[in-house]
Image (tube, rainbow, N blue to C red):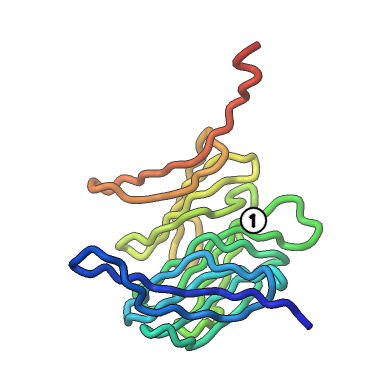
Amino acid sequence: MACTQRITIFVLMFVFSQKIHSAFIKEFDFANGTRGLKAIETKNGDFVILGFEWTGRRNLLLRVNSSGDLLWAKGTNVGYADGPAQMLELNDGTFLILGRLFLDESAAHPSGYLLKMSSFGEVLYTKIFPFEQISEIRDALILVDGSIVVVGSTELPRAVVAKLSITGDVIWSRTFDAKVATSLSVTTNGSFLVDGLKVIDLYSSYR
């Protein structure tokens, strides 16, 4: 009998007394190794959960209503082994999933990818970036003009910040002397605030 792993979804509501009350707790069974990565509230009040299903090495998207009842669950592969990292809802109710993947079993380097899905979980299109340009995407945000800014790394590795069109075409990109950029936000003056990781050779500093 196949093993299953249970994903628990819970929503916490803050009330005026500043106490935390559980609005609902829901559990769903999926294949062993499945894990939830991110949950967002949609513009119509539903909740969408991004996950990763290890058995199929694929993206997993679940949509539940405001009471936690499952509306649909969809799994999809872009490459041989997908690693989703971020999910965004667009103004039209569709979703973008971004992360990294291996194109096949023999791939030596991952590639960044963008997957657009409808409000019902159907695949609309995918975009896979050359690993020399973007080997993984760690975070992303949508600008008011509909374009997307992503951060991550190239295969060197170097931290990368890139602006994409809504279809995933690279408008511009910048690399920096760091291993990877991990998170992204916008400041009050419209600049991008990026943090990440830089590896230093500690041994060489003591020679």
The picture places residue 190, in percent across and down from the top left corner, at 27, 48
Q: Residues within 10 Å of mark 1 (few under 14, many from 20)?
A: many
The picture places residue 106, in percent across and down from the top left corner, at 81, 57
The residue type indicated by label 1 comes to Ser
The quarter of the image holding the C terminus is: top right
Q: Quadrant of residue 80?
A: bottom right
Residue at the farthest top position: 207
Name the residue nearer the viewer: 141 or 7.
Answer: 7
The picture places residue 178, in percent across and down from the top left corner, at 53, 35
The quarter of the image holding the N terminus is: bottom right
Name the residue nearer the viewer: 96 or 127.
Answer: 96
Residue at horizontal 23 percent and vertical 63 percent from the top:
18
The picture places residue 193, in percent across and down from the top left corner, at 36, 44
Above or below, 82 relative to 160: below
Residue at horizontal 64 percent and vertical 54 percent from the top:
130
Name the residue nearer the viewer: 81 or 24.
Answer: 24
Say how many tags the image has. 1
**SS at badge 1:** strand
Residue at the disc numbered 1: 111
Above or below, 171 relative to 122: above
Residue at the farthest right position: 106
Q: Quadrant of residue 55?
A: bottom right
Above or below, 196 relative to 121: above
Q: Is residue 91 left or right of residue 188?
A: right
Residue at horizontal 47 percent and vertical 47 percent from the top:
161
Name the residue nearer the viewer: 172 or 199.
Answer: 199
